[in-house]
Image (cartoon, rainbow, N blue to C red):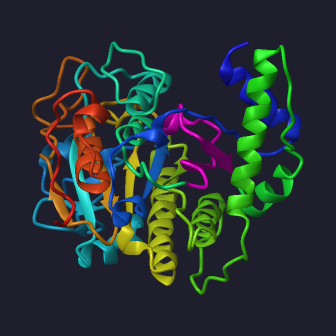
Amino acid sequence: MKRRHVLSSFASATGAALLAAHAPGWAQAAAQRPASIADRILVLVELKGGNDGLNTIVPHADATYYQVRNTIAIQPADVLKLDERTGLHPALNAALPLWEKGELAIVQGVGYPQPNLSHFRSIEIWETGSRAAEYLDEGWVTRGMKAGFGAQAHYTAEGVLIGSNDFGPLAGARAVALNNPEAFVNQARFAMPREATGNPALQHLLRVENDVSVAAQGLRGEKYNFSTEFPQGRFGSAVRAACQVVASQRGKAGVPVITLTLGSFDTHQNQLGAHANLLRQLAEGLAALKSALLELGAWDRTLVMTFSEFGRRPRQNNSGGTDHGTAAAHFVTGGAVRGGLYGQAPDLTRLDASQNVAFSTDFRQLYATVAKDWWGVNPDSVVRGRFEPVKFLRA
């Protein structure tokens, strides 16, 4: 029986929205890390389905953009202009204060060589940090753990996933998936550690149960009453849950990585309304996340980064939408972020054979930045090669 099947069976058996996995050995890494590094939080926001970068970060001075998108382009009068050529979709208005504060970095043209346009394969490439023709079982965040990040910290869990049961970047780590921290703690009391012999699959399942029980106790704590008003809807609730996880860890080693999911951005038809709604949820969620983390005194030690399997094709289709594309822009925010535009804007006059834009920033450069400048570990061991970090973090 495969390990992932054991975990899925366990989640169904308990009736709880939770999973756990254990990667032995990372906690025994020898490197000593400063407490300030071990206390840092990484929040990964998956824009599930492939976000349209061109209508998110709008090239409002590019005539070609308006030629290839005659009905779905964001008009110059509506764009939240960042400079004379680039602006935000108007639905991102709630995130504009982050930009004005100098805490929002926008990395343009993020992709990878030989892009795969399958949802399943491309997100796997992003989650594992693999090459296009390479298959890895381990998430890129897990490699960061093994490289020594927080080696001396005894984390409640190495990661918490909210809104998804797919470990993704945390594959191989001791992580917990939940939609509601309170429900998790209550349901996890049924996961009572026991002993079993002679059945390796059952032994593993019981070890998983024990990890869940330990994590549940670590997440248990008095509910924090935020003054922040969280947005309505599923993503707003996920942001609230993430902040509650951070609140429950005050005075402990904490949870170093939290993942959130928003989607679907797979806008093949009638894109304008659906995409605007998703971007509004993203912006309002990021604004609430900052507000709540400021209440907890955790904003300066939190780094938030979006990711998505791919962007969308420059030319709109016949259904008022966009099809699977390649490179797109991504957001990075936090109290330690040096805001601004990074990377090269897409050149819509130079498309590849599939009529997609060329990438200018390899997504593994973002991971290398997290590894080197946020976690303080050798980026080569995380991204498995030499990728130049992007300087979006303050010294």
Is residue 159 a member of the stretch shown in magenta? yes
Q: Quadrant of residue 226?
A: bottom right
The image shows residue 250 at horizontal and vertical percentages of 57, 73
User: Of residues 210 and 227, which is closer to you in this image?
Assistant: 210
Residue at 46%, 51% in the rendered image: 45
Residue 359 occupies which quadrant of the picture? top left
Residue 365 position in % (x across, y down):
22, 40
Looking at the rendering, the stretch of residues picked out in magenta corresponds to 155-178
Tell me where residue 133 appears, x and y as whole percent: 33, 13
Which residue is at 67% across, 83% downward? 225
Residue 268 in view of the camera: no
Q: Considering only vertical position in the picture, is 188 above or below 242?
A: above
- The residue sitting at the bottom extreme is 227
At 61% from the left and 55% from the top, the residue drawn is: 156
Give the quarter of the figure containing the N terminus: top right
Q: Position of residue 70 (x, y in %)?
A: 29, 44
